[in-house]
Image (cartoon, helix red, strand yellow):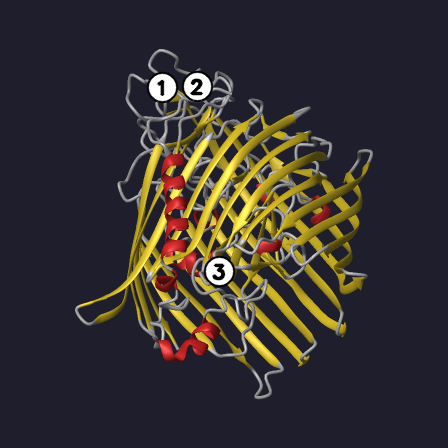
Amino acid sequence: MSHRVSSFQPRRLVLAVLLAELAVGSAAPALAQAQDQTGATAPAATDIAVLQQVLVTGQGETATSAVAGYLAKRSATATKTDTRLSETPQAVTIVTRDQVIDQGASNLQDALNYAAGVRSDAYGIDSRNDGMLVRGVSPDEYLDGVRKSMSYYTSTARTDPYTLERIEVLRGAAAMLYGQGGTGGVVNMVSKRPQAVAQNEIGVQVGSYQRKQVQGDFTGPLTEDGKWLYRLVAVKRDANTQVDHVPDDHALVAPSLTWKPNADTTLTLQALWQDDKTGSTSQFFPWSGVLTSNPNGKIPTNRFIGEPGFDQYNTKRKTIGWTFETALNPDWKLRQNMRYSYNKNDYRTIYADSFSLPGGFNADPVNQRVVDRFASASLAQTKVFGLDNSVEGNLVTGTIKHKLLLGVDYLHYKQTGSAGYPVATQIDVYNPVYTGFTFDDLALLAANTQKQTGLYVQDQLNLTPKLLLTLGLRHDKARNETEGAESQKSSATTKRAGLMYLSDSGVSPYVSYSESFTPVANSAQGQVFKPLRGEQWEAGVKYEPAGRNLSLNAAAYRWKEKNQLVAVTPVLSAQLDSTSARGVELEARGQVARGLELIAQYNYIDLDEQLNGIPSQQASLWTKYSFAAAGVTGLSVGGGVRHMNAFRDGNAPTTPDVTLVDAMLSWDSPSWRVALNVNNLGNKTYVATCLSRGDCWFGAKRNAVLSATYRW
């Protein structure tokens, strides 16, 4: 796949950062020990015993707990067991709650702007869903280890990062654990959970595009003995977007309740009510006027070519579930995660016909002003039930220690609904005149059902104190059913293996192999799809310098997959026989000096030309410096740079390279936080991608948000 590489050299930037980190780690251990994770000054040398206790980074950290700063050291996403990332033979990136707050992320794709291996804005600004790619492939989304949604994006609602403790990206195939997961990886989100210590906050936000938001997070014990804990998270937002006539209104309430009858048992009940009212910021503009020349100039990024009063993307979501864990004895644990979700989506849209004649104005080829328009309306109701049961045990055979995991999970998905495809009139893109549009003649669609059951076993073996071996095996049976059609049955056995060496220096090289299997629900248009099957090889190295809150990681991979889905039109897809990719990822994360935190990453990917084009190179760097000035403590300034190189999707015109700058200024006290976040500080107009099928997607313009939060 050919690419035009810009003069910017992100590899040199990130390699220089990594080398600098190694130099700091070897030359200035005393500097790193001058403060703990919270930035507190170290005690005097005579208090060295206390200092060592403070420096036990991750003390008290679990796979689901809060983390101070940008570096989490434990996760369950890659193993379904609470395991140190430095002992996990696969690449994992964790976006902590502190990072989400500092970067002012209000949706999932913004929260992943600085994540290694991720193209977070693959389809630009999109009010309907989070269009991410992990290692070139759309990832499956999980919430607390259970599949969040299925099928097309109209079957779910966007997750609000304010409800999350952390966002974890497992890069690479993971079917052995989850049964469903593309070859590129999965995104597992960890919900906020009730806490034993009372913590409360309420905040307000105002910002670009008439944004007004209020949010609250309240948690603590309900009883004096601490056996009952609660948490309540709520958000209400009224806002517009950078596209005219497209709102971004959002409301949610997420209560949770924990029961801890004893030290060995925990049951947490979780619920969510969410109501979103928006439209489609994606207008599917043609190449002409976006990337290629048009006699009328560039199409404005705020241009709306639907019909006000008709276009909408309204979603109501309700979920209920639980997480349960109990110790059967000192060596064995039993876990169960369950969630039932109901989603109702009312989607009505009118958009440009950029597909009949890719890149052009087929309705007005000379003047290139008027476009034909498509129209569609759908009302979809989706139910997803997920259940995961597992037992974990610690065994010893001879000199080998085992962490054994045995599990069975079940997934049931059903979608019903109705749809219609009315005829829409033409419109002048450069001087739109809205004529009004109504349509209520929806026809019932055939119900789609998908069921899947999987049995899995995993063993994490300590062959020696320094040599770790992870082995896993899983068998799945799945059934796809469309009302009135013959059902499809599929099954697969997937494997996983990883070998890792833990050196005394903190450098841990590893090699791993994993497979993917993803049954794909039939589409609302009656398309029947084969399951996706894939495999990946990965080799890497993880480095955690002793006594420092810092992690450096590198990974190289190659994956192959069959039956990958590609969009032919906004509502129709095709499956490819065979696709592949190879790449390299570098990541640095943590505290590099007193008051200075850093996130740096570099991605290189050589992706199969049959898949949607993405940049072959991406790099980003985010830093935050905390300081005091003029007697005022708690000040922080942060900034980030994101770069992607030029690329092409098939025969589409080249999407130019772009470099974006983000900024943050904040003040924190024990009771208050006031912050200003500005993304795309230079207000650059850029194109996220132009697809070979004929349409283009704009990236996000400058977005500024001023927030104030009171804590008690």
Q: Quadrant of residue 568?
A: top right
Reading the image, the residue beneath label 2 is: 359
| Pointers 1 and 2 in contact (C-beta within 8 Å) | yes
Circle nearer the N terminus (3, 2): 2
Q: Quadrant of residue 566?
A: top right
Local packing at callout 2 (Cα closer than 10 Å; few below 14, some 14-19, many 20+) is many
Of circles 1 and 2, the one toward us is 1
Instruction: Residue 549: give x, y in percent of width and height.
Output: 45, 60
Looking at the image, residue 129 lies above or below residue 694? below
Q: Is residue 534 left or right of residue 375?
A: right
Instruction: Residue 609: give x, y in percent of width and height.
Output: 55, 22
Task: Depth check: give the residue in front, 439 or 654.
Answer: 654
Reading the image, the residue beneath label 1 is: 292
The amino acid marked with disc number 2 is Gly
Task: Depth check: give the residue in front, 368 or 308.
Answer: 368
Q: Is residue 480 left or right of residue 71?
A: right
The amino acid marked with disc number 1 is Thr
Reading the image, the residue beneath label 3 is: 546
| Pointers 3 and 2 in contact (C-beta within 8 Å) | no
Looking at the image, residue 620 lies above or below residue 4? below
Instruction: Residue 34: give x, y in percent of width and height.
Output: 35, 67
